[in-house]
Image (cartoon, rainbow, N blue to C red):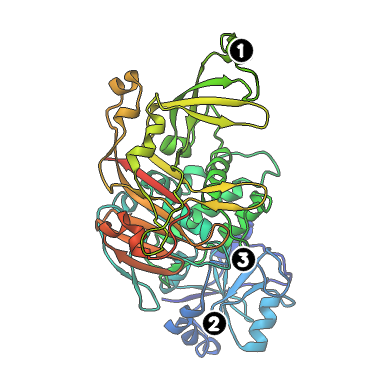
Amino acid sequence: MVSLKREREDEVEDDDDDEDRGHRLMHKQVRPCGSELIPIFPVFVSPSNRSVLDFDFEKLCSISLSHINVYACLICGKYFQGRGLKSHAYTHSVQFTHHVFLNLHTLKFYCLPDNYEIIDSSLEDITYVLKPTFTKQHIAGLDKQGKLYRAYDGTTYLPGIVGLNNIKANDYANVVLQAFSNVPPLRNYFLEEENYKGIRRPPGDIMFLLVQRFGELMRKLWNPRNFKAHVSPHEMLQAVVLCSKKNFQITKQGDAVDFMTWFLNALHGALGGTKKKPSIITKAFQGSMRIFSKKLPHPDLPPEEKEALLVTEEYQEQMSESTFLFLTLDLPTAPLYKDEKEQLIIPQVPLFNILGKFNGSTEKEYKTYKENFLKRFQLTKLPPYLIFCIKRFTKNNFFVEKNPTIVNFPITNVDLREYLTEEAQATEKNTTYDLVANVVHDGKPNEGAYRIHVLHHGTGKWYEMQDLQVTDILPQMITLSEAYIQASPPTHSVHVGKFK
């Protein structure tokens, strides 16, 4: 049954949130659809109208550019402010005979210019696309089934394996967002708005907008009732631009590892996390390591002075404990020679070779502006989800170089027990990880494009996503990604693994 309520709104300002007014509306007389609305309503409920609806973009009036009291025209999909006699929505309804509008904040439907509220259960799919909700039962079953869903445009898709629109040059952020959307504890936390809705932030703090937009994006990516099989991260990226003070932009290619570093720390802080107070970010990704650091004498000093300094306390090895959200793996220097066909040879290295950095005995020199240090590392605690960042960029004042070395990494059974201290080996029960996401950059350091390989837990299949394109891929091709791409090697690879 369709019910209509007659309402008045003479001003642009919205009164829908007024509890007293809402109470009065519930007691107004509800009458069936009048004859004057019969020609209008069938046009509205026609399935073809849903094809124009796109709720991924910023909710502002297309004329006044205001965020206040915005309505979506369900005939053409445009946004307009207000519904009073002088409002843009009212004028649009009269001028174009588009009569049905949705308040994007209250999720109520109205018929203009007659100003009736429309109550009809057949419209619930529209409000669900605008604001998807997930029950605990639904969330618990996300990784247990691989059911394909059909979008309104006829395409089929797996929730969570959904392309993100590359608006101009934001694929560096897209792949990081897609990787995190497939980390179950992080995903599950943000699918339920109640988990973070009550977090209090200081007045004027804009960082919580990042939390809200990320939660909205997660719910859209995992929505089983989408009108289309892809999502635009427009609102999410606007929050990124604002909260990062334009360090990361939509129109300029960025670095996925730099973005991930900032994003994890920004989310942790916005969720109320500190060095001592945990958040879902640290619960999922934080581990700890022991760092042994020894100061080195200046290389230009005479040998006798160096020997004298090495016995002083300042130059003795110091030990410290540090936490991490990801591990940076250094690649060996790539050889610059050619094979018999005059083609550059792209070297390969096993993952466990570069993991040797954390075995507690491998030393590496680190240079600062004034001083040099010799450091070695050993892990003391492994996180539930481990992120490897393979360092491929070398930056100086003039240009950026990339290391094309291919890392041969296993898809499953990456055991890190030997990189733990003896005490940690005795206490850590789970030390083996399986790969769940792999981010790859193709092309030149300052250009190129990003793509991601993601494991769908429900089906056990791997998928490759690059912007809006989603294809399945064999796991063997992931481990041989260089041969599969048959182009320039990846510049950055971000591996996210989980405990086996």
Is the residue marked by circle 1 packed among few (<14), some (14-19), or many (20+) residues within 10 Å?
few
Q: Position of residue 265 (x, y in %)?
A: 55, 40
Which residue carries the number 3 mark? 59
Q: Nearer the viewer, residue 18 or 425?
A: 425
Is any atom of residue 136 visible in this view?
Answer: no
The residue lying toward the viewer, choosing from 117 and 242, is 242
- For badge 2, the amino acid type reads Ile
Q: Disc 1 vs disc 2: which is toward the camera?
A: 1
Which residue was labeled with disc 2?
75
Mark 3: amino acid: Lys
Classify 471 as above or below 191: below
Identity, as a three-letter code, of the amino acid under mark 1: Glu
Residue 226: % across, % down: 41, 68
Query: Percent position (x, y) of residue 187?
Result: 41, 49
CB under 8 Å between discs 1 and 3: no
Q: Earlier in the sequence, mark 3 or mark 2?
A: 3
Q: Which residue is drawn at the image coordinates 66% and 86% (left, top)?
A: 94
Q: Nearer the viewer, residue 408 or 469?
A: 408
Give the Cα separation between the discs numbered 1 and 2: 85 Å
Q: Residue 75: which quarter of the image?
A: bottom right
Dot 1 or dot 2, earlier in sequence: 2
The residues tagged by marks 1 and 3 sit, at their Cα atoms, a distance apart of 70 Å
Query: Residue at label 1?
Result: 304
